[in-house]
Every structure is written in structure tokens, then in C-alpha cells.
Amino acid sequence: MFRPVHFEIHCTDIDRAAKFYKALFGWKIEKWSEGDYWMVSTGEKTEDGINGGMMLRSGAPPKEGSTPNAFVCTSMVPSLDESMAAVALNGGKIALDKMAVKGMGWVAYGIDTEGNIFGMMQADKEAV
């Protein structure tokens, strides 16, 4: 089994969303030094749970009354290439091909059989 290690919240207005999640859950949200991305800390490292990020939405927000489509969870995998191949073998599709996350690893996004987007990441501190 591969466990989720990161989530993302896509936003139309980062400040408004950050204010909401800080107030609701007490999350710490800070702009990351690498581009337009905000890191979300959901608790202390000694606590169970995962941390995530926030980014500006690149398309139209989900229409009111539509099914939820707000979070992208990313799972750590030992081989991104093998996991990407497994997506297709199991009836899914690749939504966004493999790309480097500088100093952290490689990430790709898939679409499951229900149309939900999810992420997969392979750790690699040498990624550029």
C-alpha cells in the first residue's frame, strides 16, 4: 500500500482561502520560495497527519451543486515511472506528465476511474 503524503487545495483567491483554513483548522500557511505556491502545515511533526499546499486554480472552479472536486492528495511511491504505467493498466489516465519538483523529487498527476485527480511523487533530492 502507498500512503498519502501531501494534499493540495486549488483556490481562486489564496488570501481568502488561507484565512478560512487558518480560522477553521488553525493551519499554518506560508508562501513557498519556489514560485506561486503556499505550504500548508496541518500540525506538529510528532502528530499523525499530512501537510499540504495551496495554489491558484488554473481553470474554472467547480460549478455549484456539482460533486466535490477540491483536494488533490499525493502519495509517495518508490518508482514514479512504474506507478504511472500502473495508472493506465488499472483503467486510469495521466492528467499531467512527470515533472521535477526542485530538490524534492518527481511528481505526476493521474485521473482515476471516477474522474478524480490524484498525485504520485517519487523522492529525489537531485531533481531539477
Image (cartoon, helix red, strand yellow):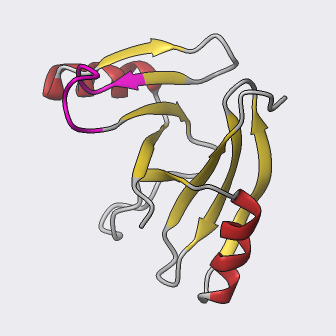
Q: Nearer the viewer, residue 31 or 60?
A: 31
Residue 71 location in percent, x, y? 41, 51
Left or right, 93 with respect to 97, comes to left
- For this orientation, the residue located farthest to the right is 128
Residue 61 location in percent, x, y? 49, 51
Q: Nearer the viewer, residue 41 or 23?
A: 41
Query: From what the image shows, is residue 62 above or below residue 106?
Result: below
The image quadrant where one finds the C terminus is top right
Residue occupying image coordinates x 69% and y 17%: 34
Residue 13 location in percent, x, y? 46, 28
In terms of secondary structure, what is the magenta stretch mainly? loop
Can residue 44 be seen? yes
Left or right, 50 with respect to 122, comes to left
Left or right, 43 with respect to 110, comes to left
Q: Which residues are magenta?
A: 40-49
Residue occupying image coordinates x 59% and y 87%: 90
Residue 104 location in percent, x, y? 66, 30
Q: Nearer the viewer, residue 15 or 39?
A: 39
The image quadrant where one finds the N terminus is bottom left
Residue occupying image coordinates x 70% and y 19%: 35
Query: From what the image shows, is residue 128 above or below residue 98?
Result: above
Residue occupying image coordinates x 15% and y 28%: 24
